Image (cartoon, rainbow, N blue to C red):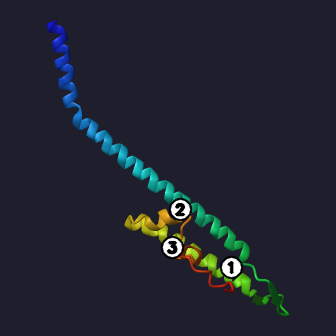
Amino acid sequence: MVDKLSVREKIADQITNIAPSVIDQVVESVVMRETNKRAEAIVRVIDKLDAAEKEFRKIDKPDQIFYNDKNEVDVAVFSEGRKNERLKKTKLIERLNNAITKAIEKGDMQDVYNMAGGKDPDRDEDKGTPPSNTPE
């Protein structure tokens, strides 16, 4: 019976002594979870940035092009709609870049979380007001 008691005492001692290592593992797990959450959010915003830049390249072509006698572009004309689309995409690209920079350089993840989740606080539609280029 003495052996069982001594085994139980040893177990109790070791359990008491593992508390610091358990705390370290818990801290490490929480930090890793937060790291992964932040990294995934930044990657989602980078993916949105890539998509916005690709869309911008598609709409960055003029509706009409006039050439001079040397066959060089003399005047490139954009319709009002295309001009507005280009402006919207340019602003979106700027906001995405700013959110990524702010997250990486300052550790402020709020804009990244908002944009990764589909909310863009600077976008008219997300403010609850009609977009500025549509008639009311």
| Circle 2 residue | 116
Looking at the figure, which quarter contains the N terminus? Answer: top left
**Horizontal side of residue 92 vs 39, given as left or right:** right
Q: Quadrant of residue 134?
A: bottom right
Looking at the figure, which quarter contains the C terminus? Answer: bottom right
Q: Residue at x 61, y 80 (%)?
A: 130
Q: CA distance from mark 3 to mark 2?
A: 12 Å
Q: As shown in the figure, which amino acid type bears the numbered disc 1?
A: Glu
Q: CA distance from mark 1 to mark 2?
A: 21 Å
**Horizontal side of residue 64 vs 112, given as left or right:** right
Q: As shown in the figure, which amino acid type bears the numbered disc 3?
A: Pro
**In the image as oriented, which residue stretches furthest toward the top?**
1
Q: As shown in the figure, which amino acid type bears the numbered disc 2?
A: Ala
| Circle 3 residue | 121
Residue 85 x %, y %: 68, 79
Q: Earlier in the sequence, mark 3 or mark 2?
A: 2
**Would you say the residues marked 3 and 2 are in contact, meaning their CB atoms lie under 8 Å apart?**
no
Residue 46 x %, y %: 55, 62
Q: Quadrant of residue 81?
A: bottom right
- Secondary structure beneath disc 2? helix
Residue 8 x %, y %: 19, 17
| Circle 1 residue | 85
**In the image as oriented, which residue stretches furthest toward the right?**
69
Q: Which of 86/132 is in front?
A: 132
Q: Residue at x 63, y 69 (%)?
A: 52
Residue 5 x %, y %: 16, 13
